[in-house]
Image: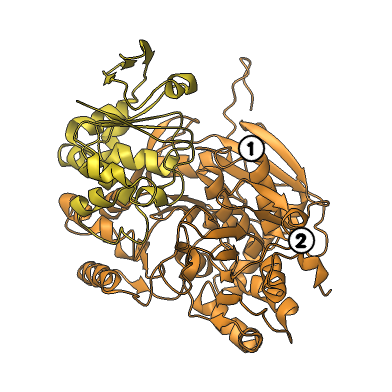
Amino acid sequence: MIFMDGKTNDKTIVQKIFSARAGRELSVGDLAVVNVDYVLAHDTTCAWAIDPFYQIAKRVFDPDKIHIFFDHAYPAPSTQAAQLQTKIRNFANEQGIKIYTDGVCHQVMAERFLRPNTLLLGADSHTPTGGGLGAFCAGFGSTDAAVAMATGKAWIRVPETLKINIEGKLGAGVYTKDVILSIAKDLSAEGANYKVIEFGGSAIAKMPVSSRLTLCNMCAELGAKTGIVPADEMTAQYLESQGRAQPFEFLRSDQNAEFSDVLTYDISNIEPTVAKPPDIDKDVSISEVEGIQITQVFLGSCTNCRIEDLEVAYNILRGKKVADGVRLIVTPASRQVYELALRAGYLEEFSKAGAVVTSPGCGACLGRHLGVLDDNDVCVSTSNRNFTGRMGSPKAQIYLASPATAAASALAGKLTDPRRYFKK
Amino acid sequence: MVRVWKFGDSINTDLMTPGRYNMTNSPEELGKIAFIEHRPEYAKSVKSGDVIVGGRNFGCGSSRETAVMAFKANQISAIVAKSFARIFYRNCINNGVVVLTAPADFIDAISEEDQIRITDTEIINETKGKRVSVLVPPIVKKFKVCGGILGYLKTHRLEDLEG
């Protein structure tokens, strides 16, 4: 409804999710205290939440709503990491909270716990990943996680929503990662600062959940509070495939809800795209960087290491060998992905190709273990960050790309257009 | 004498407290490794009351609160930037670390030798004779007075923020 003075009480989907949890109608810009449905923390951020927690509470508000994951440096690669994990284990035991060691927190949350139209407070910057299931999932610090564990609530400013419609059909060898990197080039690393990006359009309606998770994951790199794809039939099918079928509302932004802007991207002519180091928004078509020699390929992370991503890589790598001088490291995003890939024969083919196949987790993404870079390394990564020093030495170079581009580059020993290897 | 530490655009939290160094619970240790690779002289020379000045998207990247804990341990009196990334911004607010945005031209005009004075309503560059007014959100004031959100919650409920 639009009133005579032009104002509207139509709401965006995020306004609706917040209002339901604040117990009152909220407008964009309001400071509100909302109930959270889940709290997420991991082997790094949880350690810094424990002392703050005990300053304000003795018992967590609900242990079943708190999800702790050991993923960033698991199994512990150093005594320092092991000590922090012991501290977290003790805390979890005291409070009756379960710790999950089944892979990257965002992947496991999406597989096992997240439901549409809910609110996840995650002590990790890539918490927005879960927006692919139509939930509001945002990243916070450890103190916010401590407050949420103690009270079940968070203070939050109701964000503006930037609507992005995606139309058209991807060409062969071009994937969702290429789409979001192209959008990153257009918007920049702060282009969506403090906003929610709500995705719509015909391409989104057909997009599987795996790809929606990739899109929303990368919204964190555009400065956004989060990304969200309103839940629909695709979402229902995904939940069913995970054994979690349950009716839910197809919550939508109202017809006349206010968006800060509405952008439309036609993805039909997008080419494989790469983010040049050290910026997520210095994106170029693969043709501009083809031929650059590389030393490591990381096929992993919550951004792009679901079974669908491994399938794409498998189709390129199958029966071939990784180039001399290149380390290909495959780190499935979760135990579920690992087991599916094992059963499908993917992991064996990766191994035959000369890859290192690791246990599920964050792995090399953040430079702690399982593929740390040295000064002269040039890495193609399917992850979400290529900052200076992100994966090890501050002198190393990291190019972000799709799993297809990563796999093709591993075979060629240099940045390579995957369409050269693409099999239909 | 308070000095300014000036940084550019897109200073991310990995630069502030790199993953290789920040696996510690000790604020003091974190203070010692702040900017250890990006600007090694910072941690060695920073003094209580110093001001950090940044460009756009200051604090982008990882949610790691160690970045803010480090600056708090350094007893930074304020962080002034053209714009802040959201998780870093709210981590600062929650820790009672003063974060202020200022216009680009005011920031660009600041040199590290300048004398900066910050009041409740203004940032003054006394050396260059420039000043800008600042709007400090109520929540920032409420938390700062209590030393951060944890101090606030000892005498308030979270819901009191909505009042």
Q: Quadrant for residue A298, please give it.
A: bottom right
Residue A328 bears which disc, if any? none
Q: Residue at x 54, y 70 (%)?
A: A244
Three-letter code for the amino acid on which mark 2 is drawn: Val
Tell me, yes or no, if residue A352 can be seen here: yes
Horizontal relation, residue A139 to residue A6: left or right: left
- Mark 2, Cα crowd under 10 Å, few <14 / some 14-19 / many 20+, is many
Quickly name the residue at label 2: A174
Residue at image location 30% in from the left, 13% down from the top: B126
In this rendering, the answer to whether B92 lies above or below B136 is below
Sequence-wise first label, 2 or 1: 2
Instruction: Report x, y in % for residue A197.
Output: 59, 43
Chain whose colour in the figure is yellow: B
> Which residue is nearer to you in this view: A111 or B147?
B147
> Where residue A356 sits: x, y (%)?
55, 82
Which residue in the structure is indicated by mark 1? A254
Q: Considering the image in quadrants, where does the C terminus of chain A appear?
A: bottom right
* Relative image position of residue B121 (x, y in whole percent): 31, 16
